[in-house]
Image: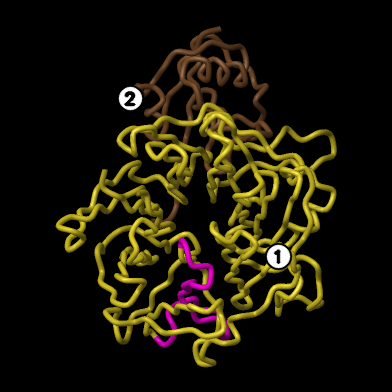
Amino acid sequence: MTATLWIGTRKGAFTLRPESGGRRWRLGGPQFLGHIVHHVVQDPREPKVLLMAAKTGHLGPTVYRSSDRGRTWREAAQPPAFRKAGQGEEARAVERVFWLTPGHSSERGTWYAGTSPAGLFRCEDGGERWQPVAGFNDHPMRPKWTSFGTPDGQLLHSINIDPRDPRHLYLAISAGGVFESTDGGADWAPLNEGCAADFMPDPQAPYGHDPHCVALHPGAPDRLYQQNHCGIYRLDRPQRRWVRIGLAMPKKMGDVGFPIVLHPTDPDTAWVLPMDGQTVWPRTSIQGKPAVYRTSDGGRSWRRLDRGLPPSQAWLTVLRQAMCADASTARIGLYFGTTGGEVWAGANGGETWRCIARHLPEIYSVTHAP
Amino acid sequence: MSCIVRIPSPLRSYTAGAAAVPAEGATVEEVLASLEHRFSGIRFRMVDEQSRVRPHIRLYVNTAEVTVLSQTVGTGDVVHVICALSGG
C-alpha cells in the first residue's frame, strides 16, 4: 500500500501519493469540499483507520472515521461535546475539534481529541462515541488555566501519551501552557517551569504560557520538545524545567515558529520552521526567505536547510499541524504545507526541498499515513 | 403534529439530498428530535450541547424566528433552517 500524505485545509481534505519512487506526486481529492478540516490522523494500531476533525462555517463540529484508508467516511455517532451545564455553570460548547491523537498501543480503539474552547475528549470505540475527560474539563483550576485564549480561541493540542504507560499523558493549550497527568487524565498539573512567557506580567507564572507544539519522542519518552510562542525548548524527565534550546539558533532567526517535528528514532534530532515574531508578529518566513532548521544534538546547535526553497520574497506561514516526517524510510522525508496552499517535500532529512503541490486552499495540517 | 422542515444544502448529506422532509412534534425541540431520529447526527450540526442554536444557524416556524426551542409548531407548519456564511 502506497504511503499517503493527508492535507487538511480550510476547504476540505486532499491526498498526495508518490509515484515513480517519489519523483512525482499525485494529488487526490478534494474530499469533504468546503469543510474546514483541521486534522487527519492515521491509527498506527490499525493502519486502515483514519479520523478527520471537521466542521463548516455554519454547522457544528464533528469527527469522521474511515476504515478503508480514506476511501469512504462515516460520521461519529456522538462527536466531542461538553457535558450539559448545571445551573449557574459556564455553558461550554465545542466550537471546533482541533487535534486528534491515537491512544496507547495497548488500548485499541482509544483516541483523544482536543478542542476549542480548550477541552479534552476521549473515545474507546475507534472514534464513534466521544466522552468529555472530566478530570481536565471540570478540573477546579481549568477556568484559570484557560482564561487567556488566542484570537482564534483557545486551542487544546499536542496530546502526547507515554508509550510505557497509558495513564501518563501530556497536553498543551494555546494559551494556557503544558499540563501533565499521571493517572489517566483524572488529575492534571502544569509543567511550564523554564518556559518564557514574555507577554505575562509574572515571568515565573506556573501557567498561562503559549506552547505552539509539543512532541514526546516515541523511542525515548522521557524527552519532550516544545515549539513555544516564546522559544524552542527541550525537557528531559524526570526534570520539570524546560531548557531553552532555541537560544542556540542564529540571533537573526530567533526561535519563534509553530511546528516541531521529531526524528522517529534519534531523540537528538528535530526540525523547526522559524517564523517572524518581531513587532506585530507577522508569522511569516523571516525576511521572506523560508528555511527549516535541524538540530542533531538535542538543540545544542542548529543547521539551516533551505536548498530548493525560494531564495527571496516568499512569505510562507506554516501552522503547527502542517509539518511532518515520513518515518517509514531510513532517509527521513519531511513535508510542510503553507497557508498559501503549497506543499513542500524535503528529501533526506530536509537537505533538499521541492514543491510537490500548489494552488490548494489554506493548509491546516499535513500528516503522513504509511 | 406533523410539519415540513426545509433543509438547506449544507445539511442535505443527512437527508439523502432531500430539500424538504416531514417531521413530527408539537415544539421545535420535538421536531429536531424527530429529525435526529431519522437522520442521525443532524441535530448537533444545528444545535450545540447546551441546546443553543449555533451562531450561524437560524430556525423559523413559518415566518417567525425561533427564539426558544420550546416554541410551538402546528400541523402543516413549515420549519425553515437557514445557514449563514461570511468571507471566503
Q: Which chain is brown?
A: B
Crowding at mark 2 (Cα within 10 Å: few <14, some 14-19, many 20+)? few
Q: Position of residue A341 (x, y in %)?
A: 33, 63
Q: Is residue A328 above or below residue B60?
A: below
Q: How many marks?
A: 2
Helix, strand or loop at label 1? It is loop
Chain letter, colour yellow: A
Q: Is residue A333 visible?
A: no
Residue receiving disc 1: A237
Amino acid type, mark 2: Gly
Q: Is residue B11 above or below residue A257?
A: above
| Chain of the residue on which disc 1 is drawn | A
- Residue B40: where, in percent of width, then height? 49, 22
Q: Position of residue A49 (x, y in %)?
A: 41, 37
Magenta-drawn segment = A264-287
- Closer to the camera in the image, B10 or A79: A79
Marks 2 and 1, how far apart at CA = 54 Å
Q: Which mark is residue B67?
A: none
Q: Residue B69, image x and y in percent?
A: 65, 25
Secondary element type, mark 2: loop
Residue A349 is left or right of residue B67, and the answer is left
Tag 2 residue: B17
Residue located 20% across and 53% down the image? A26
> Do discs 2 and 1 share a chain?
no
Quick one: which residue is furthest to the bottom in this view? A251
Viewer-side residue, A284 vs A357: A357
Q: Nearer the viewer, residue A164 or A24?
A: A164
Determine crowd level at label 1: few under 14, some 14-19, many 20+ residues with C-alpha closer than 10 A. few
Residue toward you, A69 or A166: A166
Residue in the image at 33% along x and 24% along y: B17
